Image (cartoon, rainbow, N blue to C red):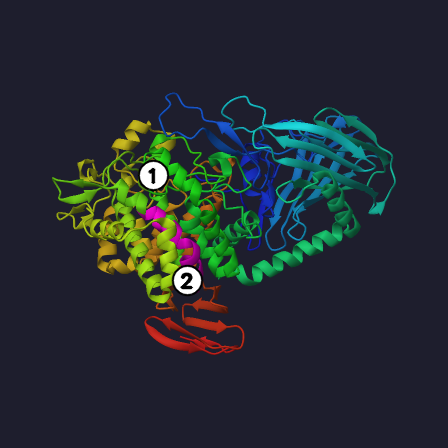
Amino acid sequence: MNQDYIIPNSWSIIEEGFIPKYVESSESIFSIGNGAMGQRANFEETYTGNTFQGSYIAGVYYPDKTKVGWWKNGYPEYFAKVLNAPNWIGINVVVNDVVLDLNTCKSISDFRRELNMKEGWLCRSFKATLSNDVQIAVKSLRFLSLAQEEIGAIRYQVTPLNCSAEISFEPFLDGNITNQDKNWDDQFWDISTVSSKNSNAFIEAETMKTGFKTCTFMHHQCTLNETPIALSFSEQNTSSRIGHTYLTHVDQGSTFSIEKIGGYISDRKHADVLQSAVDAIQIASKKGFDTLLEEQIQFWAKIWQMADITIEGDVKAQQAIRFNIFQLNQTYLGNDPLLNIGPKGFTGEKYGGSTYWDTEAYCLPFYMATKSPNVAKSLLEYRFHHLEKAIENAKKLGFNTGAALYPMVTMNGEECHNEWEITFEEIHRNGAIAFAIYNYQRYTGDVSYTHSKGIFVLIAITRFWYQRFNFSEQKQKFVMLGVTGPNEYENNVNNNFYTNYIAKWCMEFTLDTLDNIKAIDIETYRKIVAQTKLTEQEIEVIKSLSKSIYLPYSKEHGVYLQQDGFLDKNLTPASELSTDERPINQHWSWDRILRSPYIKQADTLQAFYFFEDAFTTQELEKHFDFYEPLTVHESSLSPCVHSIQASKLGRMNQAYEFYLQTSRLDLDDYNQEVHEGLHITSMAGTWMSIVEGFGGMRIKDNQLHFSPQIPEQWQSYSFKINFRGKVLKAIVQHSGTNFEVSGDEPMTIVVNGQSTNVEPNFLLTT
């Protein structure tokens, strides 16, 4: 049963009414971030009910020692954890000696929470009757600044409604925090200094083992009926916490407010974290809350100008796509080349918040089309910087001569995932990294990265692939044994079609790239060959092997098989499963799942998505009809691929249903796990569902191609594409499609197979 308490709205995520069972889900859904830090939507005031406290600093992590029952050679020493950082948002509120706590109030009414995606702020308001019968109205507004990335701001207001009252605010910093997902009882943080100066306070702390130095800080100003007031405060100070308590008399109907500026400084960018915190406070406090908020609104307006997708006639669909785009921008803006896009972003701790193959497979297209090309290039260079670590990772598993296996999970290039069937076997991640190089080159037309840096990545990955295959005398083909494909509901299988296919493609693409470099610049080619010690003999081995790779196929069904033993399974459609058994990963044993035919996410069909030009539409239809009925879509990465392919097959009702599932995966909690955090990387797949699915956008022969369709539930939709320095807008209606191009240059596009010119500032209707 999906949750259904988020109120449909085009630009906001809205919750009305206080429902304790949804608190942790809402803490995920209403999360805020600015690319440099983020936080779950925890209450500022005391809350003694069930809650998942979470504040995170980008790039700051702890290497939590691996915890397994049986150690295997090659296991990573640690699992990298994005750390729950010292809490800066807290404001304890006491009214006539009673602590405000929604878990203990006599009554709560008019509870409303809004995440305004257009302007980038979170607001919460309610009325409460405390245990002493004092009735109050509360309103809080907070945001994490995109203009000044170290800064967050809160305005917290309390109004006594039925009497005057003595009200105190205690804004505090708390370093006594921990992760919910830690393997052992290690202390992650070493707090060195807790200090205070005037209305400023600081906690300086260093991560254990990794040694990241941070400073958590706060500054505050009180007002009464919007007029600043000077109040003295009492200080509460321990070795890990500091608070300043302000107490004043408030008349009935008057409003006592506190504006709190806070955030984090880390030594990833600042040598002196304390002084940098002081400087950040000075800049932000001089601007003031209202100016900071106006900056926030303007910054988001600029993002939406390029990234927005509009949908007319379907509010829930509109809300969903903007939620996905909003969270992607909150997570990663491309400002820091040492950062990447964690599957949970800043919304939870699951998966360690590290880098997965999701970035290359799903996120890159979104960032290529809605940002500067430099943002996408930064994502590619992130992997290039980790090449030596990837070579080390492969060497630990017995590979040599510069073969590279990129990690399934990483913070710094080292593998830190420790489930053997993933760490050792889900090696298709190498293919996604190679495909991203190709995809970037195809989209931008820029080969400079590929020829100067990407080629080294491709050669190292190719060396891994040809060493990973072995020759089967029985099949007279090269086979790949003991792998896990994208479908993680099958482990340790032989000849996963997707893995074999992308390995074959990767080797061929590497050889083609080398040939292109050789033809263009023989000196560069010679330097590459010398640096990598690549020989003609090795090239011939790669060429010969790539032509003789086994791809499992069933003549009976006319489909490529997901893996060698797939037809040995009882191929019962997922539609015959009881709803009481879904999701199966929460109801079945792992043994039962592995023996079942059920597919967690697109596997064979993932190859048809990446390499659709290698297959006919009829082949896609046959494979889609064979595999989709067996797919339970219990990976967030699954519905988007199926939506795109259903669109290609002209099955718009099915494509629309998959779109709703991918776009509202978290809002409606399809997989009953949103309390753990959002599915950030799959949100880019939602964008693809519209642009590549309904819009039919492809890049072929250095041109944009479109085959637009529209769900019957919509009146129209529109999106923009930043393609090779030109911005194209598509507006799709049932009556036809309009295209507009910005700037002074015309643009040639292909629509439904017909080449046409779009003149600048002129509406083209097709």
Residue in the image at 41% along x and 54% along y: 454
* Pointer 2 local density, CA inside 10 Å: few below 14, some 14–19, many at least 20: some
Label 1 sits on what residue type? Answer: Glu
Between disc 2 and disc 1, whose residue precedes?
A: 1
Please name whichever residue, 453 or 344, is drawn nearer the observer in this view of the structure: 453
Residue in the image at 42% along x and 78% along y: 757
**Where 433 sits versus 444, above or below?**
above
Res 504 seen here: yes
Name the spot of residue 255 as percent of width and height, x first. 80, 42
Residue 426: which disc? Answer: 1
**Where 732 sits versus 290, above or below?**
below
**Where 299 sits versus 592, above or below?**
below
Please name whichever residue, 348 or 134, is drawn nearer the observer in this view of the structure: 348
Residue 252 quadrant = top right
- Label 2 or label 1, whichever lies nearer to me, is 2
Residue 302 part of the magenta segment: no
Say which element carries label 2: loop
Residue with the mark numbered 2: 447
Region of the chain picked out in magenta, as a range: 442-462
Res 583 seen here: no
Label 2 sits on what residue type? Answer: Val
Name the spot of residue 421 as percent of width and height, x first. 33, 33
Name the spot of residue 66 as percent of width and height, x first. 45, 26
Please name whichever residue, 475 or 645, is drawn nearer the observer in this view of the structure: 475
Say which element carries label 1: loop
Please name whichever residue, 538 or 589, is drawn nearer the observer in this view of the structure: 538
